[in-house]
């Protein structure tokens, strides 16, 4: 996963910074990318890859009011290696909670 994050950063011409953030069952890894972006990589076995878009939840949130903080997609890249598909998404870094505690 760390190698996939590094390869995605290289292909998207960004520099990641430590520490990395691990997600669901070790199948996602994320990191700051530069000062304004966030790079997230999700691993899916090749036989299950290609169904939903890696940005599906973000792009479907376009009808949510702009007052709700959320990441904005900038670029994606897909990597394949050793039976796994790694979908990388370069997003706007949002320093605030995606759903603030004061906003239900």
Image (tube, rainbow, N blue to C red):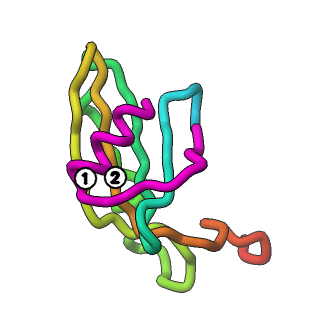
Q: Nearer the viewer, residue 77 or 70?
A: 77
Q: Is residue 65 above or below residue 78?
A: below
Answer with left or right where residue 87 lies relative to residue 78.
right
Answer with left or right where residue 48 lies relative to residue 25.
left
Q: Is residue 31 above or below residue 22?
A: below
Q: Residue 15: x and y, percent?
A: 37, 58
Residue under label 2: 89
Q: Nearer the viewer, residue 56 or 39?
A: 39
Q: Which residues are magenta?
A: 1-22
Disc 1: CA contacts within 10 A as few (<14), some (14-19) or many (>=20): some
Q: Is residue 51 above or below residue 14?
A: above
- Residue 82 placement: quadrant: top left
Whether the residues at callouts 1 and 2 have beta carbons within 8 Å, the answer is: yes
Q: Nearer the viewer, residue 4 or 24?
A: 4
- Residue 22 placement: quadrant: top right
Residue under label 1: 76
- Name the residue: 27% across, 14% down: 83
Disc 2: CA contacts within 10 A as few (<14), some (14-19) or many (>=20): many
| Residue 54 visible in this rendered orientation of the protein | yes
Q: Is residue 24 above or below residue 92?
A: above
| Residue 60 visible in this rendered orientation of the protein | no
Quadrant into which the N terminus falls = top left
| Secondary element at image label 1 | strand
Q: Residue 75: x and y, percent?
A: 25, 60
Quadrant into which the C terminus falls = bottom right
Q: Residue 88: x and y, percent?
A: 32, 45
| Secondary element at image label 2 | strand
Whichever of labels 1 and 2 marks the residue nearer the N terminus, that label is 1
The count of marks equals 2
């Amino acid at each position: 996963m760390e190698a996939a994050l590094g390869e995605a950063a290289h292909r998207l011409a960004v520099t990641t910074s430590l520490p990395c953030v691990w997600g669901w069952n070790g199948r996602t890894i994320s990191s700051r990318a530069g000062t304004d972006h966030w790079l997230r990589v999700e691993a899916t076995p090749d036989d299950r890859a290609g169904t939903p878009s890696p940005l599906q939840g973000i792009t479907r949130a376009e009808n949510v009011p702009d007052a709700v903080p959320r990441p904005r997609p900038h670029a994606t890249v897909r990597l394949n290696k050793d039976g796994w598909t790694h979908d990388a998404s370069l997003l706007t870094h949002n320093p605030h909670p995606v759903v603030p505690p004061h906003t239900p």
